[in-house]
Image (cartoon, rainbow, N blue to C red):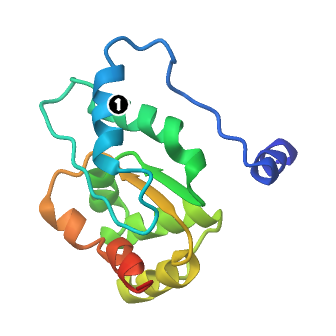
Amino acid sequence: MIVQRIINILDCKFSCVSKDLIGMDSPMQELENLLLLDVVDDVRVVGICGMGGIGKTTLGMVLYDKISLQFGACCFIDDVSKTFRLHDGPLGVQKQILLQTLGEDHHQICNLYNASILIRRRLWRQRVLIILDNVDKVEQMKKNRCVSRMVRCRE
């Protein structure tokens, strides 16, 4: 508990992906170009699709490790489709966003509206990186529009 608290205070981020991955440089550069990381006040949504086993999750993790320090709040949800099936659907994903970006559990939230309001209220002035892995249905993105709404309410 003490170590975790110190890590949270120091905002240390440890990589769980090897730095010696072969063939990652070119796709990483393409992703970074698509994200236009120098543009501060804009929303970017990039999808990586392809058959299983080609490294989509690894690419997302490497990207997260590389650029997450440029953001005020970060979140990598590693299995959105599983979260939808087993943990309250879109509400489970929104709770994960709150937990990972703010470091707070929000078990008391029981509906999408309240979760969306809380996400917008707490994160709207920050630059936020959210990576959703294993999104296998369009409604999983549509029902998590709170993130894009959060950005729109800044304007």
The residue at the far front in this view is: 38
Residue at image x 34%, y 57%? Answer: 83
Nearest the viewer among 133 and 21 is 21
Q: How many marks?
A: 1
Residue at image x 57%, y 50%? Answer: 70
Give above or below for 86 relative to 111.
above
- At which x and y percent is residue 127? 52, 64
- At which x and y percent is residue 92? 40, 66
> Where on the picture, by quarter, is residue 116?
bottom left
- At which x and y percent is residue 44? 31, 59
Give above or below for 82 relative to 142.
above
- At which x and y percent is residue 152? 36, 81
Q: Residues within 10 Å of mark 1 (few under 14, many from 20)?
A: some
Residue at image x 34%, y 21%? Answer: 24
Question: From the viewer's perspective, is 93 left or right of 34?
Answer: right
Residue at image x 49%, y 54%? Answer: 75
Mark 1 — residue?
A: 28
Residue 110 visible somewhere in the drawing: no
The residue at the far right in this view is: 2
Nearest the viewer among 44 and 117 is 44
Q: Quadrant of the C terminus?
A: bottom left
Nearest the viewer among 150 and 17 is 150
> Where on the picture, by quarter, is residue 49?
top left
Q: Amino acid at mark 1?
A: Met
Residue 93 visible somewhere in the drawing: yes
SS for dot 1: helix
